[in-house]
Amino acid sequence: MEQLENQEEQFDWNAFLNKSSYTLDELRLARKLSESWVTCAVGVQCNIIPRDRHDIPLDNILRGLGEDFWKAMYNMYFEEEACKDIHFIKEEAKQILKKIELRSVFLINQEAIKK
């Protein structure tokens, strides 16, 4: 996943995934934001989660979920571009996002215990 610099507003992934329809530009933006560890669904969680110097989470589970989320965003964009139904991919992305949020809470709590 590539880095995006100077992303000033935090993207609301839950709001995005709860929309009833999308333009290709919206899906293109979501795909682009999901490519960066800073702006992806993992990156917008909390900066207390341990990361390496490239902002990649040190937790393998969270990193894998982030990669799965990126794949879902990638597939949503290309399926919509091909005029196919994206409902199932969108539901998968919602489930992955929920797992990211739950894992992030766990990791944040672990960090709080350390202090």
Image (tube, helix red, strand yellow):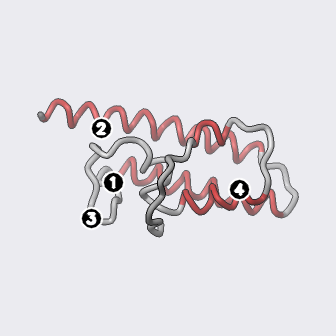
Distance from disc 2 to disc 4, alpha carbons, whole Å, reads: 29 Å
Distance from disc 4 to disc 3, alpha carbons, whole Å, reads: 28 Å
Q: Quadrant of residue 16?
A: top right
Q: Residue 90, how many percent across, how many down?
A: 69, 44
Residue under numbered circle 4: 27
Distance from disc 3 to disc 2, alpha carbons, whole Å, reads: 18 Å
| Residue type (three-letter) at the residue carrying disc 4 | Leu
Closer mark to the observer between disc 1 and disc 3: 3
Q: Relative to residue 89, is residue 112 drawn left or right?
A: left
Q: Residues within 10 Å of mark 2 (few under 14, many from 20)?
A: some
Residue under numbered circle 3: 53
Q: Which numbered disc, 3 or 2, marks the residue that appears first in the sequence? A: 3
| Residue type (three-letter) at the residue carrying disc 1 | Pro
> Residue 107: which numbered mark, if any?
2
Residue ranking furthest to the right: 83
Closer mark to the observer between disc 1 and disc 4: 4
Q: Residue 45, how many percent across, how many down?
A: 41, 42
Q: Residue at x 64, y 59 (%)?
A: 29
User: Tag 4, which secondary structure?
Assistant: helix
Q: Which numbered disc, 4 or 3, marks the residue that appears first in the sequence? A: 4
Q: Is there CB contact under 8 Å for labels 2 and 1?
A: yes
User: Tag 2, which secondary structure?
Assistant: helix
Closer mark to the observer between disc 3 and disc 2: 3
Residue under numbered circle 1: 57
Q: Residue 34, how many percent across, how many down?
A: 55, 57
Distance from disc 1 to disc 4, alpha carbons, whole Å, reads: 24 Å
Q: Residue at x 69, y 58 (%)?
A: 75
Q: Which numbered disc, 2 or 1, marks the residue that appears first in the sequence? A: 1
Distance from disc 1 to disc 3, alpha carbons, whole Å, reads: 10 Å
Closer mark to the observer between disc 2 and disc 4: 4
